[in-house]
Image: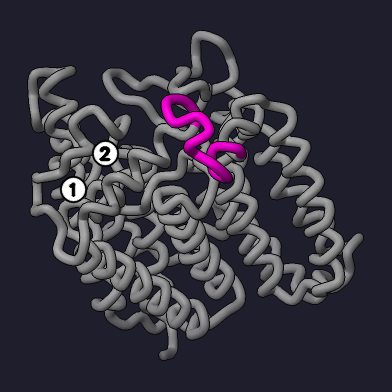
C-alpha cells in the first residue's frame, strides 16, 4: 500500500455534514410535540441527537486520520466482541425489549444496539477475507461458502432478537461485497432461490411479519392496525406538494404517525419541505453514493476497495429500504434513514464508518 497520504475527500465531508444538519433540524421538528407531551421538554430528542451527532463527528474526524489498514489488523477481535454483544443482548435482564425486539443493551441513561455495530464489524472482517481469498471466490466450496457462513451466522443471531430489518441490511451489504469480489453469477442465482425460500419461511414463522406483508399489499384492509403506519405516512407525504407546508408545520406529527422522528422521519420532511426538500435529500444521498464509489474504485489495494464499497453499500441499502417503506413501496421493516433518523447507535456508527471511508479517500487515486 502507498504510504503517501493526501487530504481527505472534502466533498464527501460536506455532503455528510449537510445530511447531518438536515437530520438535526428534522429530528427536532418531528419530535417536538411528542417530546413535550411525554417529557415536558420539546428539545428532549433533539438534545440527545445533538449529543450523539457530536460524538459521531468527533469519531469521524479522529478515524479519518487512522490508517484504514489498522481495521484489517483488528478485524477478528472486533467481530468477536460484536458477536459476544449480540449474544448478551438475548439474555433476559441484559437485553432491553423495544417494539417487540430485544435488540438493546442499557448503558446508564442510554442504550446501545449491538446489531448496528455488527454491520460495521462484518464489513471490516469480510473485506479482509475477500482481499485475501479473491482467487478462491469463484469456487463455491472454497471461496463463497465460507464467506456466506461468516455472514449468516450473525444474521441468525440477529433474527433471534428478532430484527429482520437490520439483518436484511447486513446480508444485503455483504452480498454486494461478495458479488463485486468476482463470485459467479450462477452461484448467486442458486443463492437467490434459497434466499426467497428462506425469506418466505421467516415471514410465515411470525404472524406480525405476515401482517406487514398484507398491509403493504393493501394497507386499507386494516387501517387502524397493521396498515396504520403506511397510511399515515402517505397522508404526510401527499399534502406536502411541491414546496411543503413549511418547516415545523407538519400535521401528522400530532400523534398520527407513531414516533415520527425515527423510521418515518422522511415522511415528515416531505410534508414540511415538500417534493423539493425530499428531492434535495435524495440528491445528497446520491452524491454520497457517487463519491463513495469513486473512493472505492481509486483505493490502492483490494482491502481498501472492499472496505469502502461495503460502507457505501450499507448506507445505500438502508436509504433504499427506508424510503421504500415510507413511500409504501416496501413492507415496514424498522430501518432508520442514515444521518437523519433519531437513534444514537445508528448515527454514531454511520459517522464513524464515513470516517473510515474518508481515510481510504486519502490514499485513493481519482
Residue carrying label 2: 261
Q: Is residue 257 above or below residue 364?
A: above
Q: Residue furthest front?
A: 221
Q: Is residue 212 above or below residue 296?
A: above
SS at circle 2: loop
Q: Pinpoint residue 214: horizontal percent, then vertical percent.
A: 60, 37
Image quarter of residue 13: bottom left
Q: Report the residue at 29% width, 70% height from top.
A: 284
Tell whether label 1 touches label 2 (CB within 8 Å): yes
Label 1 Cα neighbours within 10 Å, binned few <14 / some 14-19 / many ≥20: many
Quadrant (top left/top right/bottom left/bottom right) for the C terminus? bottom left
Q: Is residue 109 above or below residue 266?
A: above
Label 2 Cα neighbours within 10 Å, binned few <14 / some 14-19 / many ≥20: many
Task: Indicate how the structure is coloured in the image.
Answer: one colour
In the foreground, 16 or 265:
265
The disc label shown at residue 26, or none: 1
Q: Is residue 285 magenta?
A: no
Q: Pinpoint residue 315: horizontal percent, then vertical percent.
A: 44, 59
Image quarter of residue 183: bottom right
Q: Pinpoint residue 310: horizontal percent, then vertical percent.
A: 54, 63
| Among the two numbered marks 2 and 1 on one chain, the one whose residue lies closer to the N terminus | 1
Query: Could one spot residue 78 in this view of the protein?
Result: no
Residue range highlighted in magenta: 214-226
Left or right: where 277 falls relative to 301: left
SS at circle 1: helix
Q: Residue furthest top?
A: 93
Image quarter of residue 65: bottom left
Q: Pinpoint residue 5: horizontal percent, then vertical percent.
A: 35, 80
Q: Report the residue at 48% width, 42% height from top.
A: 117
Real-space Cα separation, disc 2 to disc 1, in angstroms: 8 Å
Left or right: where 263 falls relative to 194: left
Amino acid at each position: 500500500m502507498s504510504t503517501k497520504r493526501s487530504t481527505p475527500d472534502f466533498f464527501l465531508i460536506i455532503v455528510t455534514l449537510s445530511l447531518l444538519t438536515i437530520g438535526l433540524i428534522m429530528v427536532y421538528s418531528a419530535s417536538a410535540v411528542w417530546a413535550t407531551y411525554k417529557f415536558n421538554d420539546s428539545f428532549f430528542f433533539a438534545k440527545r441527537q445533538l449529543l450523539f451527532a457530536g460524538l459521531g463527528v468527533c469519531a469521524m474526524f479522529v478515524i479519518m486520520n487512522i490508517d484504514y489498514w489498522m481495521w484489517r489488523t483488528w478485524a477478528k477481535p472486533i467481530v468477536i466482541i460484536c458477536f459476544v454483544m449480540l449474544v448478551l443482548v438475548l439474555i433476559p435482564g441484559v437485553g432491553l425489549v423495544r417494539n417487540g425486539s430485544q435488540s438493546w443493551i442499557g448503558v446508564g441513561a442510554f442504550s446501545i444496539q449491538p446489531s448496528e455495530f455488527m454491520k460495521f464489524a462484518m464489513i471490516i472482517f469480510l473485506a479482509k477475507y475477500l482481499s485475501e481469498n479473491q482467487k478462491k471466490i469463484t469456487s463455491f466450496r472454497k471461496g463463497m461458502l465460507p464467506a456466506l457462513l461468516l455472514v449468516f451466522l450473525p444474521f441468525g443471531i440477529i433474527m433471534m432478537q428478532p430484527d429482520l430489518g437490520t439483518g436484511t441490511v447486513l446480508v444485503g451489504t455483504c452480498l454486494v461485497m461478495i458479488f463485486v469480489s468476482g463470485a459467479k453469477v450462477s452461484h448467486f442465482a442458486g443463492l437467490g432461490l434459497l434466499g426467497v425460500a428462506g425469506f418466505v419461511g421467516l415471514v410465515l414463522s411470525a404472524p406480525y411479519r405476515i401482517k406487514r406483508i398484507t398491509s403493504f399489499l393493501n394497507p386499507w384492509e386494516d387501517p387502524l392496525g397493521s396498515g396504520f403506519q403506511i397510511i399515515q405516512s402517505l397522508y404526510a407525504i401527499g399534502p406536502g406538494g411541491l414546496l411543503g407546508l413549511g418547516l415545523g408545520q407538519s400535521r401528522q406529527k400530532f400523534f398520527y404517525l407513531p414516533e415520527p422522528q425515527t423510521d418515518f422521519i422522511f415522511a415528515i420532511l416531505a410534508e414540511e419541505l415538500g417534493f423539493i426538500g425530499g428531492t434535495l435529500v435524495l440528491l445528497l444521498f446520491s452524491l454520497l453514493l457517487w463519491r463513495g464509489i469513486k473512493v472505492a474504485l481509486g483505493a490502492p489495494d483490494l482491502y481498501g476497495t472492499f472496505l469502502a464499497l461495503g460502507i457505501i453499500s450499507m448506507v445505500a441499502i438502508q436509504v433504499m429500504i427506508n424510503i421504500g417503506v415510507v413511500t409504501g413501496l416496501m413492507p415496514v421493516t424498522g430501518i432508520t434513514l442514515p444521518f437523519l433518523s433519531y437513534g444514537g447507535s445508528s448515527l454514531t456508527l454511520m459517522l464513524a464508518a464515513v470516517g473510515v471511508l474518508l481515510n481510504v479517500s486519502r490514499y485513493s487515486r481519482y
